[in-house]
Amino acid sequence: MAEKDRRSGYLRPDLETMDPQARQEYLDRRVREIVAHAHAHAPAFAQKMAAVGAEPGDIRGVDDLARLPITEKADLVKLQRAGLPFGGLVGEQIDKLARIYVSPGPIYEPGEKVYSDDRWAQAFFAAGFRRGDIAQVTFNFNLVPFAFWLDASLNLVGCVSVPAGVGNTELQIQIMRELGVAGYLGTPSFLATIADRAEELGLDLKRDLQLKVAFVAAEMLPESLRASLEQRLDMVIRQSYGTADVGCLSYECFHMGGMHFAQDCVVEVVDPETGRPVGEGEPGEVVATVFDHAYPLIRFGTGDLSSYTTGVCACGRTSPKLTRILGRVDQVTKIKGMFVHPSGVQQVAQKFPQVAAYQLVVTRDGHKDVMTLVCELGEAPADSAELKGAMETAMKEVLRVSGAVEVVAPGTLPQGCKVIDDRRNWD
Ligand SMILES: [Zn+2]
């Protein structure tokens, strides 16, 4: 059989290659429709609109979404406790549902009888899954929706799913060998465990396994791990980003360079304080609106920080891309008007192997924020002024805020201190 072309094509060419103006009009129409549906069928959403004095007719499209409040995960828990099971957020009668999923919280989530949302399926196709592939789902099938969504989405691409669930490494390897499994869905670390165990069992990873493509999620994917697994298993590994509440929001294509916004949902990146969209390249909270009639979440705040880029991708998809996930909103600190996250501080410190411990201290001088990176050095540098200068330049580049570096004696910083110590007093 000829090798499948896994690098080109689209699951939904009409949507994935749409020009930006046409996409805007399409999404505006979808937003009007879901807002009207949610307002009519989900009382909690109707109350949220009433609270800001908005009527369905006021929301004419994507740009008007900024008028509506953001719903965070904590709000879901609160609404549900006040009105079990779904807190007035569900837009269908219970007999239209196939399942009730339970996510940590606990949060109860409706599962529609006919699963037609193809956003995960778009991600699979972009990674290289193709019709006829046998694919093994190694995510947890217990209570939470994710693995069920993936199982149904594989069918939407024309793949055959093996609902393997977590663990049982040797059985997983046996299934992969005996069925000629081409697709892996799971965490990157479990794929590494599978590769290690298969080698311990004396298997040749490229000859005895026929893996071609992996869809990984739920963990960070270090580029070094991706490169080593792709090389060892002779396969392509791609990742996506989404949540158990709103499903797939973005995914990598063959060409990578970020994760394309999934089609048929609205992804916004907003200032966590004002809820207003930020510009291209600026960090903000990822906020999603999905067009699911059973569970019409509108402006759901993921709590994750990212930024987006626009431009033409070599794959032909025209949607913007999320850059990597930068961290969580609740750990972000606003300094001199810019959001600074612990991961950014870590990124600065890691550029300098001499730095043994560090903490970013934020204080006020009159009405100005002052940012100081306090460091302990492993050994005294030949030229400490030069090192401080280089670190201050790196701070400005990475954090986009200027600050000073202060070197202190080893043992000054407390063990395991928090990365950002905000000492500003706003009284
Ligand atoms: Zn692309």
Image (tube, rainbow, N blue to C red):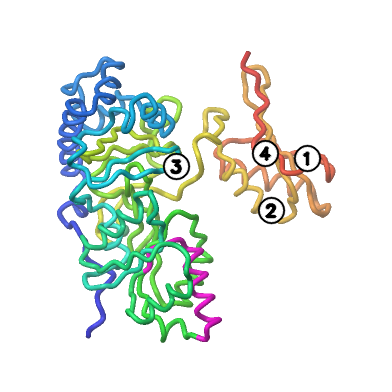
Pointer 3 residue? 104
Q: Is mark 2 within 8 Å of ligand 1?
A: no
Q: Amino acid at mark 4?
A: Lys
**Of labels 3 and 2, the one closer to you:** 3
Give left or right: position of 209 versus 393: left
Q: Nearer the viewer, residue 51 or 396?
A: 51
- On whether residue 243 falls in the magenta region, the answer is no
Q: Nearer the viewer, residue 174 or 19?
A: 174
- On whether residue 193 falls in the magenta region, the answer is yes
Circle nearer the N terminus (1, 2): 2
Q: Amino acid at mark 1?
A: Leu
Structural crowding at the residue carrying mark 2, measured as other residues with C-alpha within 10 Å and reported as few (<14), some (14–19) or many (≥20): some
Pointer 1 residue? 413
Location of residue 358 (image quadrant): top right
Q: Residue at x 29, y 35 (%)?
A: 297
The number of callouts visible is 4
What segment carries the magenta color? 184-202
Q: Residue at x 17, y 26 (%)?
A: 40
- In the rendered structure, are the residues bearing label 3 and label 1 in contact, judged by CB atoms less than 8 Å apart? no
Numbered disc 1: secondary structure:
loop
Q: Is residue 107 above or below residue 41?
A: below
Pointer 2 residue? 352
- In the rendered structure, are the residues bearing label 4 and label 2 in contact, judged by CB atoms less than 8 Å apart? no
Q: Amino acid at mark 3?
A: Pro
Circle nearer the N terminus (4, 2): 2
Pointer 4 residue? 418
Q: Is residue 342 above or below residue 161?
A: above
Location of residue 253 (image quadrant): bottom left
Numbered disc 4: secondary structure:
loop
